[in-house]
Amino acid sequence: MPNADIFMALCKIYDCKNILEMFSFINADYSIPTDEEWDIIEKYRFISTNSPDGASVVDTVLDREYAIAGKLKEQNEKIIELTEIPRYVKEDSTYVNAAHAIEGASEEDKQFDEDIMTGEDF
């Protein structure tokens, strides 16, 4: 059994960045960066150390994309399934008829909607 120092040296030699995922039967905790994420972090650190302007460009792109992703997430959360939309139907009917669903609709409105639903001319 290697001691901790030798174990860590072997991990470095074999480029192992997530010890739990590599050596145990424990389900990986994905709050720990993946190898791909570590590569991105290392590239960002290199850029920020050697090219401050380059790091500024990366920051700008990340901020913009993060904001867009947040807006898309909000939009997706607002989308509801068709089965969740309330159906406004007449009590004695199984189909939607818009004018009949509105309380206080005039007889003229009801007839117009009925004509749209059944008339060939509409």
Image (tube, rainbow, N blue to C red):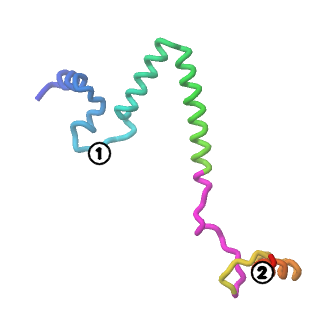
Q: Residue at x 58, y 53 (%)?
A: 77
Q: Amino acid at mark 1?
A: Asn
Q: Quadrant of residue 95?
A: bottom right
Q: Residues within 10 Å of mark 1 (few under 14, many from 20)?
A: few
Q: Which residue is mark 1?
A: 27
User: Can you say whether 46 is above or below 108 in the image?
Assistant: above
Label 1 residue SS = loop
The range drawn in magenta is: 76-92
Return the mark for residue 50. none
The residue that appears at 60% across and 39% down in the rendered structure is 68
User: Is residue 86 covered in magenta?
Assistant: yes
Residue 115: horizontal and vertical position, in percent? 81, 81
Between circles 2 and 1, the one closer to the viewer is: 2
Q: Please state, as top left, top right, bottom left or bottom right, where the C terminus lies in the image.
A: bottom right
Q: Quick one: which residue is furthest to the bottom in this view?
A: 92
Name the residue: 53% across, 19% down: 55
Give x and y (percent) for residue 82: 60, 66
Q: Amino acid at mark 2?
A: Glu
Measure the alpha-carbon separation of dots 2 and 1: 63 Å
**2 or 1: tag closer to the N-terminus:** 1
Residue in the picture at 83% in, 80% down: 110
Mark 2 in CB contact with mark 1 (< 8 angstroms): no
Would you say residue 95 sits in the magenta stretch? no
State the residue lying farthest toward the top: 50
Q: Is residue 27 left or right of residue 97?
A: left
Give residue 10's quadrant in the image. Answer: top left
Tell me if residue 57 comes above or below residue 105 in the rendering: above
Q: Residues within 10 Å of mark 2 (few under 14, many from 20)?
A: few
**Quadrant where the N terminus lies?**
top left
Pointer 2: what residue? Answer: 120
